[in-house]
Structure formats: structure tokens, C-alpha cells
């Protein structure tokens, strides 16, 4: 004599299994993202509240003029990132992005070393803050804001 599970109970069991799988996947994803997240700092924050040594972070600011130096190996570059309030020395070994120049914006991904130098694994050079797309170049500021608002569905 075998006991069969009623269809109503089978559906309930399947729903519970699916719900448990969804919760498990969500927890796994959040744990993975927590370990991969890198926080963004500007030099003033880096100096006032430095992150833990070795923690993956991003440092954003302006490359100070006269601070870029290429070491004898030809691949390693040192420079200073500032924000007008504080300065952070950066050490990068690799090929510099095309837009990387003194006086321009940069986002460096890496870690703070024990001596206070930021060791960058990756550099993202930013275009200057006065950049205007060619489609908006001949418009007034008010017209450009309207176009941006229409495109994004909200205010600029």
C-alpha cells in the first residue's frame, strides 16, 4: 500500500523548493558582490578616513601637474592625485590610458599600501569636465537640459 501525495501538496512542495532555491541564489549573489565591491574615495576622504590596508577601492581625482614620473623600468609610473583639499601618491605599473595626462581626471582601482601610497592595478582616464557631445554643442544650456531630460525620462 503506497501513499501518493495529493496534487495540491505536490504544488506546495515545489513552491517551497523554488522559494528556497531563490533565497539561496540571492544570498550567494549578495555574498559574492560584497566580496567584489570596491568603494570610491576622493583624496580628502582617503586622508581623513583611510581604508584598511589592502582593501580593494577606487580613488578618483585630478592628476596634479608636474607629478607624473616614469621610473627607469619604463613601465612603472608614479603621480599624485589631488582634489584641492588633499593629495595621494599613486604607483602604477602598466600601460597608461591614452587620455591620461597631467591636469586631467583619473579613477585608479587598487589598494592602499602600508606606507600610504595607493598602488593602482587599473587606471581609467576621464575626459575633461567641459566635454559636450557634438549633438549638444550648438544648443543653449537650457535646450541641452531639455534634450537630456527627454532622453533620460527625468531632470538633468
Image (cartoon, grey):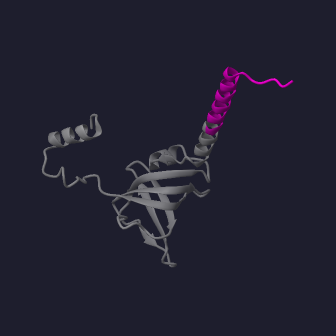
Q: Quadrant of residue 70?
A: bottom left
Q: Is residue 44 left or right of residue 27?
A: left
Q: Is residue 28 left or right of residue 79?
A: right
Quadrant of the frame with the N terminus: top right
Based on the picture, tell me whether residue 14 belongs to the magenta stretch.
Answer: yes
The residue lying at 23 percent from left, 38 percent from top is 150
Question: Looking at this rendering, what residue extends furthest in the front direction?
Answer: 1
Compared with 91, 47 (above or below) is: above
| Percent position of residue 11, x then y | 65, 25
Judging depth in this view, the residue of 98 and 81 nearest the camera is 98
| Percent position of residue 2, x then y | 84, 25
Query: Total marks drawn?
Result: 0
Based on the picture, tell me whether residue 10 belongs to the magenta stretch.
Answer: yes
The residue lying at 43 percent from left, 68 percent from top is 96
Judging depth in this view, the residue of 90 and 120 nearest the camera is 120
Question: In this picture, which residue range is highlighted in magenta?
Answer: 1-25
The residue lying at 62 percent from left, 39 percent from top is 25
| Percent position of residue 92, x then y | 50, 65
* Magenta stretch, main secondary structure class: helix
Q: Quadrant of residue 97?
A: bottom left
Compared with 19, 84 (above or below) is: below
Q: Is residue 17 left or right of residue 136?
A: right
The residue lying at 27 percent from left, 38 percent from top is 156
| Percent position of residue 148, x then y | 24, 41
Compared with 12, 144 (above or below) is: below
Amino acid at each position: 500500500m503506497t501513499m501518493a501525495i495529493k496534487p495540491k501538496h505536490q504544488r506546495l512542495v515545489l513552491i517551497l523548493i523554488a522559494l528556497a532555491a531563490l533565497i539561496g541564489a540571492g544570498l550567494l549573489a549578495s555574498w559574492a558582490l560584497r566580496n567584489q565591491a570596491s568603494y570610491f574615495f576622493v583624496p580628502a576622504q582617503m586622508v581623513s578616513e583611510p581604508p584598511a590596508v589592502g582593501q580593494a577601492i577606487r580613488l578618483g581625482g585630478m592628476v596634479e601637474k608636474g607629478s607624473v614620473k616614469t621610473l627607469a623600468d619604463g613601465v612603472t609610473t608614479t603621480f599624485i592625485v589631488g582634489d584641492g583639499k588633499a593629495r595621494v601618491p599613486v604607483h602604477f605599473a602598466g600601460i597608461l590610458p591614452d587620455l591620461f595626462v597631467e591636469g586631467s581626471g583619473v579613477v585608479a582601482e587598487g589598494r592602499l599600501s602600508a606606507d600610504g601610497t595607493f598602488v593602482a592595478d587599473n587606471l581609467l582616464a576621464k575626459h575633461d569636465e567641459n566635454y559636450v557631445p557634438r549633438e549638444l554643442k550648438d544648443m543653449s544650456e537650457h535646450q541641452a537640459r531639455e534634450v537630456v531630460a527627454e532622453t533620460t525620462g527625468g531632470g538633468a
